[in-house]
Image: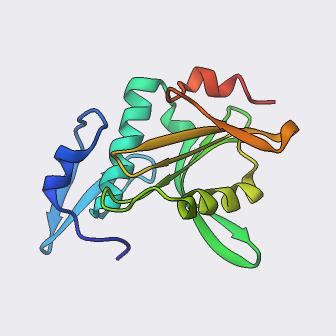
Amino acid sequence: MKGENFHPDIIQNLTLPPVELKICRRNDVYKVFDPLRKNYFILTNEEFVRQSFVAWLIKDLGYPKSLMANEIGIRLNNLYKRCDTVVFSNSGTPLMIIEYKSPTVAITQEVFDQIVRYNMVLNAKFLTVSNGINHYCCQIDSANNGYHFLSEFPSYEFLKSYDN
């Protein structure tokens, strides 16, 4: 099992809007339904952040569920890695990669380095990291070999305008 066991008190710490998640208990293990993967998964703090974040994107920011995927496998330097969430354009181009951490994990340079490595494969225009408390989204500036952080989290309408 990846991550630490779910602790209900983390819900109070999140800066995401409250959402309703499908949570069940099976054999003394709590599981949460992932609407993108259409299955139940072990509920860890990180999984709670993922499901809360995805629900916020869909409900409040107009992200189409059909253009999002969780746990996307990629090959990076002969290693198999998984992107937590990838948001796609209508044409199937990756627009954004999202990396989640438990609220007890600080968002550090190492976290950004991880998502940048994933982007070497996917070439998304936007990278996001969140631990449910702090959320950072940056836009890649390929022309100047750089990036800049956005002051607000982008709607899907804004994102798709960068599909070329």
Q: Position of 134 compared to 110: left or right?
A: left
Placement of 77 over or under 101, stated as above or below? below
Residue 82 can be seen, yes or no:
yes
Nearest the eye: 149 or 58 = 149
Q: Percent x, y for residue 46? A: 35, 59
Left or right: 52, with 149 as reference point: left
Image location (x, y in percent) of residue 144: 85, 38
- Asked whether residue 93 is in view, the answer is no
Q: Which residue is drawn at 83% across and 44% down?
A: 145
Residue appearing at x 73%, y 53% in the figure: 122
Q: Image height check: is 66 above or below 154?
A: below
Residue nearer the viewer, 102 or 83: 102
- Horizontal and vertical percent for residue 59? 37, 27
How are the colours assigned in the image? rainbow
Quarter the C terminus occupies: top right
- Can you name the residue that lies furthest to the right here? 143
Q: In this view, does 125 lie to the left or right of 33?
A: right
Numbered-mark total: 0
Q: Position of residue 162 (x, y in %)?
A: 73, 27
Task: Looking at this view, name the residue that lies furthest to the front.
Answer: 109
In the picture, residue 150 is in which quadrant?
top right
The quarter in which the N terminus is drawn is bottom left
Residue depicted at x 67% and y 56%: 116
Horizontal arrangement in the rendering, residue 147 relative to residue 62 (left or right): right
Of residue 134 and residue 37, the one placed in the foreground of this image is 134
